[in-house]
Image (spheres, rainbow, N blue to C red):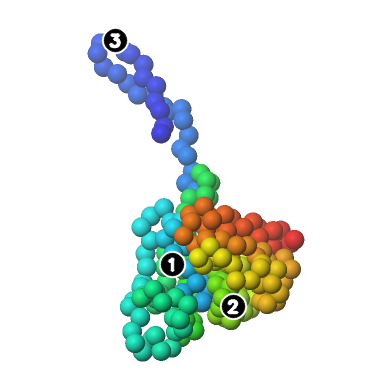
């Protein structure tokens, strides 16, 4: 907070001198995306790391939707994102992430262009038990040329496949980071977003 110096004049009156402190600049805003297939942990990750109450567009999974979306490995999931999720995270006094989550189902893919526009990078969340469901997200960001990292969510604390096996199955470029994370842990999600940020900066510098 800016401080001010005061000089006593003749009599009880006080006059304010020019403030000597400079104003602190607000942190630089950066848009990031968390993406991936249905039920992989995108909404959970944003809720875990966001410093504000996250904005979600969750809707109940109806019997019709349950017949389209495979809930066999996520039987406790009763809602799904139908537009986007939103949260924010201040990494340090100079940088603040605005985090957007995409819907997971293919039928909501028409929203992705608007949700991801202007993003510096993306974190593609993967359930290693259902690798096939993350291919649309991987293909999308490769096609758009958006820097991204793969975050393999450890459901029940276990990875069904090793990270090298996941990299091989997804056939991503060697420079794409592949990390394990826990969508319920704020620290884990934060570290994964930093991996995306560093990867995007390396790309921007031509590495």
Quadrant in the rendering for residue 122: bottom right
How far across and how far down the image is residue 98, in percent?
47, 59
Discs 1/2, front: 2
Discs 2/3, front: 2
Q: CA distance from mark 3 to mark 1?
A: 64 Å
How far across and how far down the image is residue 201, in percent?
65, 58
Foreground pick, 157 / 34: 157
| 47 left or right, relative to 15 | right
Of label 1 and label 2, which has the lower sequence position?
A: 1
Q: Which mark is residue 10?
A: 3
Residue placed at 38% from the left, 86% from the top? 65
Residue placed at 39% from the left, 73% from the top? 76
| 57 left or right, relative to 42 | left
- Residue 87 in view (yes/no): no
Q: Which residue is mark 2?
A: 131
Foreground pick, 85 / 13: 85
Residue placed at 54% from the left, 56% from the top? 188
- Residue 142 in view (yes/no): yes
Q: CA distance from mark 1 to mark 2?
A: 18 Å
Q: Is residue 151 above or below residue 70?
A: above
Callout 3 secondary element: loop
Q: Which mark is residue 167?
A: none
Q: Which residue is mark 1?
A: 43
Q: Is residue 187 above or below residue 70?
A: above
| 130 left or right, relative to 65 | right
Of label 2 and label 3, which has the lower sequence position?
A: 3
Residue placed at 29% from the left, 18% from the top? 14
Callout 1 secondary element: helix
How far across and how far down the image is residue 52, in percent?
38, 55
Q: CA distance from mark 2 to mark 3?
A: 79 Å
């Amino acid at each position: 907070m800016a401080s001010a110096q005061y000089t006593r004049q003749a009599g009880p009156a006080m006059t304010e001198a020019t403030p000597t402190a400079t104003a602190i600049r607000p942190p630089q805003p950066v848009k990031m995306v968390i993406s991936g297939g249905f039920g992989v942990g995108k909404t959970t990750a944003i809720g875990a790391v966001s410093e504000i109450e996250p904005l979600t567009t969750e809707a109940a999974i109806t019997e019709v939707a349950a017949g389209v979306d495979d809930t066999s490995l996520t039987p406790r999931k009763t809602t799904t994102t139908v537009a986007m999720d939103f949260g924010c995270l201040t990494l340090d006094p100079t940088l603040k992430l605005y985090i957007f989550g995409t819907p997971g189902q293919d039928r909501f893919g028409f929203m992705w262009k608007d949700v991801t526009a202007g993003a510096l990078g993306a974190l593609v969340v993967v359930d290693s038990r259902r690798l096939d469901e993350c291919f649309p997200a991987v293909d999308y960001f490769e096609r758009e040329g958006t820097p991204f990292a793969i975050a393999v969510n450890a459901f029940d604390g276990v990875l069904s496949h090793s990270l090298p096996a996941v990299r091989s199955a997804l056939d991503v470029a060697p420079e794409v980071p592949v990390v394990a994370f826990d969508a319920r842990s704020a620290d884990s999600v934060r570290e994964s977003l930093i991996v995306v940020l560093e990867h995007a900066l390396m790309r921007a510098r031509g590495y």
